[in-house]
Amino acid sequence: MLLITCPWCGARPELEFSYGGEAHIARPADPASVSDADWTAFLHLRGNPKGAHRERWRHTHGCARFFNAVRDTASDTILATYKPGDPPP
């Protein structure tokens, strides 16, 4: 079982969490001025690296807060977790 450490609640089983997608994606400042192709890319294209990947997670069955995690996609190991707004480790 994968244990994920919520920055507020501590280590909990993965069943308490929901994946929220890639972290640190900046939304366009003026979405109306973005082309359809660029908007489609923003909504649907994400990185899929082998190795360390920054992701958003939500402690759905706990404090219900979002946080960021660095997960190794090759080993499915959570390397670090941190609160939104904190610098990535």
Image (cartoon, rainbow, N blue to C red):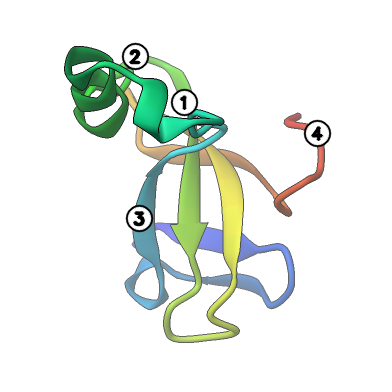
| Structural crowding at the residue carrying mark 1, measured as other residues with C-alpha within 10 Å and reported as few (<14), some (14–19) or many (≥20) | some
Say which of marks 4 and 2 sits in front. Answer: 4
Is residue 18 rendered to the left or right of residue 40?
Answer: right
Q: Residue drawn 73% across and 54% down?
A: 83
| Amino acid type at mark 4 | Pro
Q: Distance between the residues labelled 4 and 2?
A: 20 Å
Q: Residue drawn 74% across and 73% down?
A: 8
Q: Identify the mark at residue 19; answer none if there is no mark.
A: 3
- Check disc 2 and report the residue beneath it: 49
Q: Where is residue 78 in the image (x, y as percent from the top left)?
A: 51, 42
Q: How far apart are marks 3 and 1 (CA)?
A: 13 Å
- Check disc 1 and report the residue beneath it: 53
| Amino acid type at mark 2 | Pro
Q: In terms of sequence position, does the residue under pointer 4 or pointer 3 come before the other? A: 3
Q: Residue furthest front?
A: 33
Q: Residue drawn 37% across and 32% down?
A: 32
Q: Distance between the residues labelled 1 and 4?
A: 14 Å
Q: In terms of sequence position, does the residue under pointer 3 or pointer 1 come before the other? A: 3
Q: Identify the mark at residue 87; answer none if there is no mark.
A: 4
